[in-house]
């Protein structure tokens, strides 16, 4: 089993739709979790951290389920500019230089 | 977050040659990392660049192929040595604090093509 797994997609959704991505991780001792966004041929950029209680940033909501070892990202009212690859990132250690694993990414295309 | 600059942004190289990529940060950072992202793939950690000591390499990556320097807390270089077409990739440096709750931030990458 891969350490971090994501549905690769692509997810093709119309503008205004709500879309959800899931990510599962294998190491139950994982400490911290993030969602990054990567545009085509660009570097990954932090979208949001994921907190145990769940957190929201505008149209984006992230949730963590430690018991089931998955995190999710919900995007409401999708915009064309949301089209990108979304990377789930898991830090398995207690410090930032312990093992950080990037998921394979989920591709999203928002269609007019 | 820190501003991270990578040079060159892209290059096309002949096989058998070597290229050094520079990563400059506008503030002192404890941790710097080098990643590779091959076409259609996610990021793979090459090594952690430690200031004042040898880099720590991940499985499958060796110092002879990817020598790294970290002379101070704001700068690092990665050299891709004796390049082959399989080394064609995006190379990314990133920085982070010491707390695991602090995310990594990336430079804008070096797009490398080997002929």
Image (cartoon, grey):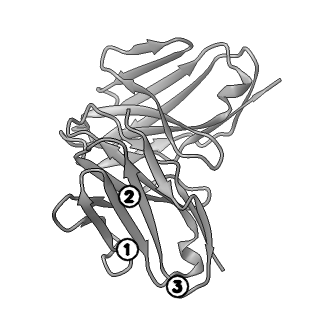
Q: What residue sits right under mark 3 in the picture?
A: B17
Quadrant into which the N terminus of chain B falls: top left
Residue wearing tag 2:
B34
On the image, the x and y values in percent for residue B35 come to: 42, 57
The residue sitting at the right extreme is A112
Helix, strand or loop under label 1: loop
Q: Which residue sits furthest bottom?
A: B16
| Front in this rendered view, residue B64 or B52 | B52
Q: Nearer the viewer, residue A33 or B23?
A: B23
- Select label 3 or label 1 by which is in front: 3
Which residue is at a point 53% across and 88% down the rendered structure image? B16
Callout 2 touching callout 1 (CB < 8 Å): yes
Category of crowding for the residue at label 2, using alpha-carbon neighbours closer than 10 angstroms: few (below 14), some (14–19), many (at least 20): many
Assess whether mark 1 and mark 3 are in contact (beta carbons under 8 angstroms). Answer: no
Q: Which of A21/B85 is in front?
A: B85
Marks 3 and 1 sit apart, C-alpha to C-alpha, by 13 Å
What x and y, as percent, mark residue B101?
26, 31
Which one is earlier in the sequence, the residue at label 3 or at label 2? 3
Quadrant position of residue A94 = top left
Q: Return the x and y of residue A17 as percentages of the image width and height.
A: 70, 16
Mark 2 belongs to chain: B
Whichever of callouts 3 and 1 sits on the residue coming sooner in the sequence is: 3
- Residue neighbourhood size for the residue with mark 3, other residues' Cα within 10 Å, grouped as few (<14), some (14–19), many (≥20): few
Q: Is A12 left, or right, of B19 in this rendering?
A: right
Are discs 3 and 2 both within one chain? yes
**Closer to the eye: label 3 or 2:** 3
Q: CA distance from mark 2 to mark 1?
A: 10 Å
Which disc, if any, is residue B66? 1
Determine if residue A42 is in view. yes
Q: What is the secondary structure assignment of the residue under circle 2?
A: strand
Residue A105's disc is: none
């Amino acid at each position: 089993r891969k350490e971090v797994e994501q549905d690769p997609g692509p997810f093709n959704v119309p503008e205004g739709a709500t879309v959800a991505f899931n990510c599962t991780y294998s190491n139950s001792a994982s400490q911290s979790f993030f969602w990054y966004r990567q545009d085509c041929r660009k570097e990954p950029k932090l979208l949001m951290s994921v907190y145990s209680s769940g957190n929201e940033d505008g149209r984006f909501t992230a949730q963590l389920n430690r018991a089931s070892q998955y995190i999710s990202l919900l995007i409401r009212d999708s915009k064309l500019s949301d089209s990108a690859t979304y990377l789930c990132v898991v830090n398995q250690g207690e410090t930032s230089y312990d093992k950080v694993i990037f998921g394979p990414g989920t591709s999203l295309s928002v269609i007019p | 977050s820190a501003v991270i600059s990578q040079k060159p942004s892209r290059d096309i190289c002949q096989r058998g040659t070597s290229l050094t990529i520079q990563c400059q940060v506008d503030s002192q950072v404890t941790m710097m990392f080098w990643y590779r992202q091959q076409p259609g793939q996610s990021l793979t950690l090459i090594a952690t660049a430690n200031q004042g000591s040898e880099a720590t390499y991940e499985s499958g990556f060796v110092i002879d192929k990817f020598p790294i320097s970290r002379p101070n807390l704001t700068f690092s270089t990665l050299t891709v040595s004796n390049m082959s077409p399989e080394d064609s990739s995006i190379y990314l440096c990133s920085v982070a604090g010491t707390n695991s709750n602090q995310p990594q931030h990336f430079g804008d990458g070096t797009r490398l093509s080997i002929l």
